[in-house]
Image (cartoon, grey):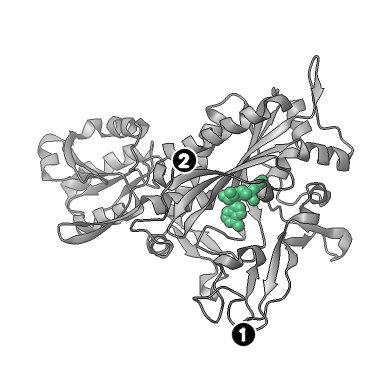
Amino acid sequence: MVGLESYEGPATIEKVASLCRRRGFVYPSSDIYGGLGSSYDFGHYGVLLNQNVKAEWQRSMIFEREDVVALDSSIILNPKVWVASGHVGGFSDPLVDCRTCKLRFRADHIDTSACGRRPSKHPGETPDCDLTDPRDFNLMFETFIGPVREDASRAFLRPETAQGIFINFKNVTSSLRVKPPFGIAQIGKSFRNEITPGNFLFRVREFEQMEMEFFVPPAEADEWYRFWVEARLSWHLGLGLRPSHLRVRAHDAAELSHYSSATSDLEYLHPIGWTELEGIANRGDFDLSAHAEHSGTKLEWIGHEERYVPHVIEPALGVGRAVLAFLVDAYDEEEVAGEQRIVLRLHPRLAPVKVAVLPLIGKDEGLVGKARPLYEELRRVMSTEYDDSASIGKRYRRQDEIGTPWALTIDHQTLEDDTITIRDRDSLAQERIPIVGARALLEDRLEQPWHPRK
Ligand code: GAP
């Protein structure tokens, strides 16, 4: 897939963050106490959008397949898990401090970091820069189990959900009807003490991951790796990400993690450039073998005539990172009748609200008498909003900014012939339809493919 050289479009991370705050998607965390750097709380529409992204992931990973089962493992695991996985010894970033500006940088990101004193320069480039040698900084958050703060009670908040899956391999294979190739999928919070969080939801210290470990016979690993790269690419495209803003980039040998024999990133073209959206890794038998060795429990597949340690293919995606890409991709500005319109052209299945029911005049009892029953009927089957405040124009603009694909307006003609108008967020076309058919029409539209822009 050929991607663009650089981002061209109306979105910036700042504009998207500002819309998210203004419209109740995402707030800076601990705001009234001055915030907590790069931490965010999700408001009503953010919660709904997150849920829709997770539901789409579960739908394609679990419900539309017969070979993937679900899991929800603990955030705090036996600390030995992180020794076996290599996180205690190796989950670190190289860190340098500048003694002059007192800022801290990732040694491997110096070329893209800005020096604290001269924003046009990179750290180390001005005569005043005084950088320390790189030292390793472990990214795991530590905590203590029980009342005594001693080494024996030290534990970690998980930095990835994947290890909870590997350590349950035996439980799952002995309790459920699974047989390689099969997968275990999990969505949950992960924590990383990132040195340089930033760019809104892109890199944060507390985030949700959607990870699936797919266990396969070793000889089939390459084939399944290629399958999952394509499948994950299709998922993002099917939910509306523009093809020209999405590409697959294979890691070269120097970039590969200690556990991986092949990894590809799906990269998204943000206003900040091409960045990792999702990783798909061929982890080989590294994890099952490491946990078998450290725990003393055999983690292998035993069939009628075969016995082997499965290899693992892992697609891993951050919920917030996906949400940010969908928001940036959907963000649009245009001029309509001399006024600027901001609109989120989200895929209808991702949109937090599917339809708004708007009586033309909120205080007109006749209109309300038609609008409320319609609203009550629709909200039973899809996320629906009723809004009778302000002018109709303002109400449309509000729905455009939260990405509601359709608005139903009840006007005086409704009282005469029981028809309403349906307004399309993207084309702005308005059609008259019978009120009795509204629910079926919307349910049908939600099932239709939605065509993203180029
Ligand atoms: N189990 C493999 C694993 O965790 P990763 O590439 O470190 O691999 C997987 O993380 C995905 O999790 C990333 O592609 C990204 O979408 C998301 N992710 C990782 N660190 C993140 C952070 N600090 N903030 C937000 N999302 C993050």
Between 321 and 69, which is closer to the camera in this rendering? 321
Please rate how many residues cluster around mark 2, counting C-alpha atoms within 10 Å: few if below 14, some from 14 to 19, many from 20: some
- In depth, the one of 307 and 258 nearer the eye is 258
Q: Does residue 304 sit above or below 339 in this rendering?
A: above
Q: Position of residue 178 (x, y in %)?
A: 69, 24
Q: On the image, numbered disc 1 is attached to which residue? A: 128
Report helix, strand or loop for mark 2: helix
Please give the residue where the numbered disc 2 appears in the rendered image.
236
- Image position, residue 288 (x, y; %): 78, 37
Alpha carbon distance from label 1 to label 2: 45 Å
Position of 401 compared to 292: left or right? left
> Where residue 141 sits in the image (x, y, percent)?
72, 61
The label nearer to you, 1 versus 2, is 1
Left or right side of 162 for 363? left
Quadrant of the rendered image containing residue 259 = top right
Q: Earlier in the sequence, mark 1 or mark 2?
A: 1
Identify the residue at horizontal 53%, vertical 37% (top origin). 232
Q: Does residue 61 appear left or right of residue 131 in this picture?
A: left
Q: Identify the residue at image location x=40%, y=47%.
A: 352
Q: Which of the two residues, 175 or 179, is positioned nearer the viewer here?
A: 179
Q: Is residue 140 above or below residue 283?
A: below
Neighbour tally class for label 1: few under 14, some 14-19, many 20 plus, Cα within 10 Å: few
